Image (tube, rainbow, N blue to C red):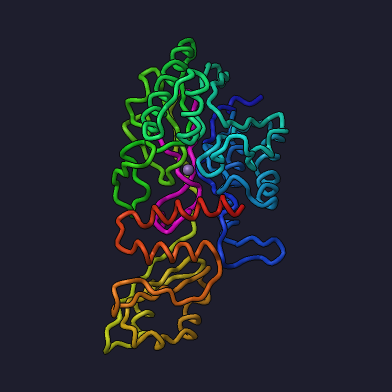
């Protein structure tokens, strides 16, 4: 055995199964963009194999929903689960809020991998101990559980009824006590690591988003982590960052939405002494282009001017604000020619004649209809984007 087998590779929110409505391979039904997400996940697995890692941990939201198409489950099996198994690397999969169903009894696509001896799927909290490079490491694992599920557990174990409006506070208290007790149980180990999938208060979602406290979201607070825990490595937030010293988010291995367009993406390599490195992966460039057109302007010229010089392989989103009268003046053929090397581009027209976003396309896609509906009805709502994300998630779960 080589002496190098010691890193713990931690990968966050992969979101396999996320649908994109462009560059779809008619054979597989998969968008090339979905292959970007998968490709970076496979690169993390490759890195683990090349570095003879001791452990490969997926920190939740491997899948975008509780049920994803078999083709995605097969790709994960083929490019990640099985190669890691062949290299003798143990794999841990924690459930996240996207792939853990609200009802525990309903299964998730994650359960597919239970049959492998080298894989452990965690859908409820657990403690594991491993000896790595001569050091005894204690792991406290807290997969995502919906607050209702936590309350349900409190009722089962204590026979105590918790009113719905107190669910979040009860869940926080329950998690805090549980983590504290497990850390105490692990007093004999050399290092205690907490793996989980939750939001800590004060995190930033992306460098383009302001860090705001959304009071209705279920959050952890740093006080919930006892001193006895040496390192906290979490998934759920897609931006790699450190919170309060010892709390680290691995971040997503690729950019999942447009808010993440400026952020570096990758995974973490944790060493048995508790130190870690962020390993960056190549992320597809995303350009958000805004053109504001006035009555006297040439629409096409204005848009061409606003484009970055290099777009080959980029995702481009163009938002054109213009008076309704100029809506038909864009020379789409010239634009298409200029953007022919782009990976994909989309145009959104914003009317400067009316304050609201106008949907110009006709679609029967339920997800887009719902997004458009939220855009229209909640146009001025400060949390419109967050509401849209959650609404689409619930719809997807319902349609799956
Ligand atoms: Mn999540």
**Coordinates of residue 365 in the picture (x, y in percent):** 55, 66
Residue 63: image location, x then y, percent: 58, 46
**Magenta segment includes 293:** no
How many dots with numbers? Answer: 0
On screen, residue 12 versus residue 31, left or right, reads: left
Is 338 above or below relative to 123?
A: below
Residue 124 in picture, x, y percent from top left: 55, 28
Query: Which residue is pictured at 37% across the width and 64% down the height?
Result: 377
Q: Which of 18 and 386 is in front in this view?
A: 386
Query: For this rendering, which residue is in front, 55 or 198?
Result: 198
Region rendered in magenta: 248-273
Residue 384 to residue 57: above or below: below
Magenta segment includes 272: yes
Q: In which quarter of the image is residue 203?
A: top left
As drawn, 44 above or below 139? below
Residue 220 shown left or right of residue 31 in the figure? left
What's the residue at 53%, 54% (across, down)?
A: 395
Q: Residue at 51% across / 66% down in the picture? A: 313
Image quarter of residue 327? bottom left
* Quadrant of the image containing the N terminus: top right
| Vertical placement of residue 108 versus 142, above or below | below
> 354 or 305: nearer the eye?
354
Residue 80 occupies quadrant: top right
Could you say where residue 60 lies in the image, as x and y percent from the top left? Answer: 53, 39
Q: Residue at point 34% right, 45% down? A: 204
């Amino acid at each position: 055995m080589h002496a190098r087998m010691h890193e713990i590779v931690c990968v966050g929110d992969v979101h396999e199964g996320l649908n994109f409505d462009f560059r779809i391979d008619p054979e597989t039904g998969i968008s090339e963009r979905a292959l970007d997400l998968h490709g970076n996940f496979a690169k993390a697995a490759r890195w683990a194999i090349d570095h003879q890692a001791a452990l490969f941990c997926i920190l939740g939201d491997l899948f975008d929903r509780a049920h994803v198409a078999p083709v995605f489950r097969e790709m994960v099996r083929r490019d990640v689960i099985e190669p890691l198994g062949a290299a003798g690397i143990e794999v841990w999969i924690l459930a996240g809020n996207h792939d853990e169903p609200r009802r525990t009894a309903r299964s998730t696509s994650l359960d597919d991998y239970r049959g492998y001896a080298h894989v452990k799927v965690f859908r409820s909290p657990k403690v594991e101990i491993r000896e790595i490079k001569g050091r005894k490491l204690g792991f406290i694992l807290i997969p995502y559980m919906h607050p209702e599920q936590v309350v349900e557990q409190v009722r089962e174990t204590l026979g105590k009824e918790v009113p719905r409006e107190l669910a979040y506070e009860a869940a926080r208290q329950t998690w805090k006590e549980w983590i504290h007790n497990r850390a105490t149980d692990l007093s004999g180990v050399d290092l205690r690591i907490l793996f989980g999938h939750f939001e800590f208060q004060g995190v930033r979602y992306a460098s383009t988003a302001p860090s705001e406290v959304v009071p209705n979201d279920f959050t952890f607070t740093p006080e919930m982590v006892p001193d006895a825990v040496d390192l906290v490595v979490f998934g759920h937030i897609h931006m790699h960052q450190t919170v309060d010293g010892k709390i680290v988010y691995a971040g997503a291995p690729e950019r999942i939405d447009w808010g993440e367009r400026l952020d570096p993406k990758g995974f973490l390599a944790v060493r048995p002494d508790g130190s870690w490195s962020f390993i960056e992966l190549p992320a597809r460039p995303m350009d958000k282009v805004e053109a504001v057109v006035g009555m006297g302007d040439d629409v096409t010229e204005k848009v061409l001017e606003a484009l970055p010089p290099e777009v080959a392989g980029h995702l481009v989103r163009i938002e054109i604000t213009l008076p309704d009268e100029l809506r038909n003046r864009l020379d789409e053929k010239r634009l298409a020619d200029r953007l022919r090397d782009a990976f994909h581009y989309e145009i959104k027209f914003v009317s400067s004649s009316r304050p609201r976003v106008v949907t110009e396309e006709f679609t029967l896609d339920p997800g887009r209809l719902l997004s458009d509906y939220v855009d229209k009805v909640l146009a001025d709502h400060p949390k419109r984007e967050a509401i849209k994300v959650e609404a689409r998630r619930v719809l997807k779960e319902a349609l799956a």
